[in-house]
Image: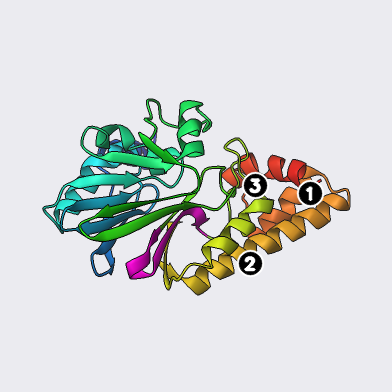
Amino acid sequence: MSRTFAARTAAGFLFLVLAWFAYTQNQNQPPQLALNKVKDDLYEIEGDGGNVAVYITGDGVILVDDKFDRDHEGIVNKVKSVTNQPIKYVLTTHHHSDHSGGNTKFLPTAEIISTVNARNNIIEHKQPNAEPGMSPAQVVFTTEMSVFLGGKEVRAQYFGRGHTNGDAFIYFPALRTLHTGDMMAGNTPLIDYTGGGSVIEWTKALDEALKLDIDTVIPGHGPVTTKAGLRAYRDNIEKLRARASGLIHEGKSQEEVGKVMAAEFGWGPNSLQAQWSLPGIMRELK
């Protein structure tokens, strides 16, 4: 064996050892969360799952969503960095584990609230890749409810199917701010048909949300935006639906429709959109 070959082999082995060490160390690291101020007493926590809203009142804190179970300590620490008030309510936007996975650890000290359908979806295990042991909300509503705490109101409203069949919009009327959950998330919609979602009903629900007096929008994932940003997201869903519907009525196959969705709307072949949304769209729009 030559010295050059031996050196290269040793270097390659060392690289693999270091890469594996870095990987295992990162796996043991707590999730990295960032706290951002939205306005007045409203903050949002980004990173590792859905965006969490933090509303501080003189009598306690109201959260919107609680990420994964593993994020509980990080969320609590972020809240403690801006207030000594306890977390009293968690309003969950929908049943997916990156938004409701922390329910179990919050339940002993906070009231968990969701739509009826979001609760049922957790009980019926509608999310195939959900983490085990998720806990549903204790308090549910069908169309609208409000939480009043420390002289402040937070309103939860259900406008119909979209991402799932149980998506709640969380409205902060005094701040003209709306948390959309995954009714707005990223750059393109994910329609969870197993969870009762609908590409047809989605824009109708957003039309109702856009009637609210808002200027600021916290999406389920991604940076805080404006009412104009939400309207643009709504219009993109309508464009996607019309494009898919046209292709389906032309007799295009699921594979052919998928290629167009990938090219024009960023639906990668291994994405959740391709796995969850595309088969459902073929059925719903036929």
Tell me where the magenta segment starts and ends, as one range. Answer: 171-186
Graded by Cα atoms within 10 Å as few (under 14), some (14 to 19) or many (20 or more), the crowding at tag 3 reads: many
- Residue 17 visible in the current orientation: no
Which residue corresponds to mark 2? 235
* Horizontal relation, residue 279 to residue 11: left or right: right
Question: Does residue 64 show up magenta in the picture?
Answer: no
**Mark 1: secondary structure:** helix
- Residue in the image at 48% along x and 71% along y: 227
Quick one: 227 or 25, which is closer to the camera? 227
Residues at marks 3 and 1 touching, judged by CB atoms closer than 8 Å: no
Residue 270 in the image: x percent, y percent? 60, 43
The amino acid type, in three-letter code, at marker 3 is Ser
* Horizontal relation, residue 59 to residue 39: left or right: left
Q: Is residue 33 above or below residue 41?
A: above
Residues at marks 2 and 3 touching, judged by CB atoms closer than 8 Å: no
Q: How many marks?
A: 3
Which residue corresponds to mark 3? 198
- Residue in the image at 51% along x and 26% along y: 124
The nearer-to-camera label among 3 and 1 is 3
Quick one: 30 or 98, which is closer to the camera? 98
Residue 127 in the image: x percent, y percent? 51, 33
Could you tell which of marks 3 and 1 lies nearer the N-terminus? 3
**Mark 3: secondary structure:** loop
The amino acid type, in three-letter code, at marker 2 is Asp
Q: Please, what is the dominant secondary structure of the magenta stretch?
A: strand
**Mark 2: secondary structure:** helix
Which residue corresponds to mark 1? 256
Residues at marks 1 and 2 touching, judged by CB atoms closer than 8 Å: no
- Residue 128 visible in the current orientation: yes
Q: Where's the N terminus, which quadrant?
A: top left
Graded by Cα atoms within 10 Å as few (under 14), some (14 to 19) or many (20 or more), the crowding at tag 2 reads: some
